[in-house]
Amino acid sequence: MRTRQFLHRPRRHRGAPVRAAAPLAAALAAAVLAVTGCAADGGTARRADPGSAATGPAARTPAPSGTGGTTGTPGSGGATGTPGVDGATGTPAPAAPDAPRVPFGGHAGRYAAGTLRPSGDQAALDAKVVEHYRRWKAAFVRRGCGHDRYQILSPDADHPYVAEAQGYGMVVTATMAGADPDAKKIFDGLLRYVLAHPSSITPGLLAAEQDASCKSVNGGDSATDGDLDVAYGLLLADRQWGSSGAFDYRGLALDRIRAIREGEINPVTRLTKLGDWTDRGDEYYWVSRSSDWMIGHFRAFRRATGDPFWDAVTDAHQDLIAAQQARYAPGTGLLADFVVGTRTAPKPAPREVLEDPHDGAYWWNACRTPWRIGDDAVTSGDARSLAAVRRMSAWIRKETGGDPGRIGAGRTLAGRRISGDTELAFSAPFAVAAMADPGGQAWLDALWDEMAAAAFTRRDYFSASVALQAMITVSGNRWTP
């Protein structure tokens, strides 16, 4: 296994300005810390009286639950339960306050017409996801860094805790409720950790990296992908458990979405920035990372906020995807890790613009794009997302002769293999793309079999996390808030 490199952010001088985006964020974080007795950056504070009433804005009166246009009725679906899966019955949720409204295994999400599923019994597919989840949880979910906080460990990253991992954890645990009776407890613990580590520039965002002592490092600024998943995870939590408990998930989600708009979306191009640390005039302001192009998240933000700004963000990213495929990868559909010159003439990054010599190739960031774009394709049915992933899937299926073992770890945009290694982080996302590929049934089955049989170690956080989320979608368990 190759250790994956994470984005290196240039260090800011000590006097760098703090952005005033989403002023509620700091107050929300402070209120939550006061309620839970958690001090920032892994310290400890006096524990709140368990019997006392929470009064801060994060523990307020109920907010309206989010609604979605593509998710179906909570708790509904054709599945009748997965043997051996706790609570995954597909029946209406009981009235208990913390009972999931969209339990895993209920298949409440509506997929686009023609979407493929792996061959075989649905209960067996669900059971494989739960098995992978339990191994992932045992390997990477940690309780620490303060009272009642949880974190997702990332031992193959530059630091043990990264924003991307916490975002993954929040999305996964909100989705796996019903299969895991501890899902809400873990989600809330992850949320406490996130709120305890605000960005030093935009308080409503998450500091990108923490060290082994739970202290934010490298300037304490943000990374866009982590915040996108945190906000999306909060919308899932609002749908899953409602917002009348200790946390106002919906209010926190809306606050973070506002902060993302202010700090992580380029106001000129409407494309994702690398983080809140890039400003107009610096060389990174016109650079975007393809693994942050989460079209389905942008749609969810539009539904939650009613803000047409997110329609423009969706369109800008889909236009960029189509243009990059047509101009730089017409035969493969592959996307580069980073795109530069986004204001005038977007193109794949040159060597080492940010991370390594393969910044302009289909490498350790872009490997997620078939999953991210594919998720939107199968849940929204958008013709642009479908076209993008069908191009990728048809090419890789033909290139490999239907053998997942030939995908490899990294490709040039023309399709040449960069590495002789094999990595689940590169093969699993193609399974999501294959769901939208009319000729891809046998290919999808082969990819599913590989994911279902894959072993991973406690050093394989990245591949295991990507594969788990791909399996959730491929098994028919993805739903949108």
Image (tube, helix red, strand yellow):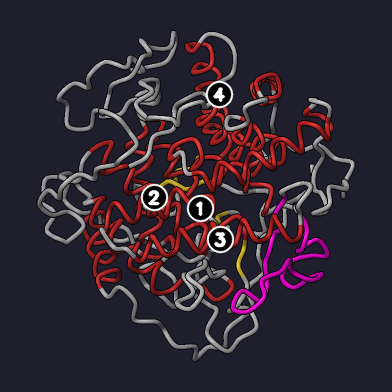
Which residue is labeled 1 in the image? Answer: 294
Question: Residue 235's spot in the image, x, y percent?
Answer: 32, 47
Q: Earlier in the sequence, mark 1 or mark 3?
A: 1
Q: Residues within 10 Å of mark 2 (few under 14, many from 20)?
A: many
Whole-angstrom CA distance, mark 1 to mark 4, is: 21 Å
Question: Residue 450's spot in the image, x, y percent?
Answer: 71, 23
Q: Earlier in the sequence, mark 1 or mark 2?
A: 2
- Which amino acid does the dot numbered 2 rest on? Tyr
Mark 1 touches mark 3? (CB < 8 Å):
no
Q: Which residues are magenta?
A: 334-361
Mark 1 touches mark 2? (CB < 8 Å):
yes
Q: What is the quadrant of the N terminus in the image?
A: top right
Q: Reply above or below: 219 against 214.
A: below
| Mark toward the viewer: 3 or 2 | 3
| Secondary element at tag 1 | loop
Q: Which residue shows up at 72% across the image and 41% down it?
A: 426
| Secondary element at tag 4 | loop
Q: What is the quadrant of the C terminus in the image?
A: top left
Q: Residues within 10 Å of mark 3 (few under 14, many from 20)?
A: few
Q: Quadrant of residue 31?
A: bottom left
- Which amino acid does the dot numbered 4 rest on? Leu
Q: Earlier in the sequence, mark 3 or mark 2?
A: 2
Which residue is labeled 2 in the image? Answer: 232
Question: Residue 27's spot in the image, x, y percent?
Answer: 24, 70
| Mark toward the viewer: 1 or 2 | 1
Which residue is labeled 3 in the image? Answer: 319
Question: Residue 358's spot in the image, x, y percent?
Answer: 80, 61
- Which amino acid does the dot numbered 1 rest on? Met
Q: Which residue shows up at 44% across the image and 32% down it?
A: 478
Q: Which mark, residue 116?
A: 4
- Which amino acid does the dot numbered 3 rest on? Asp
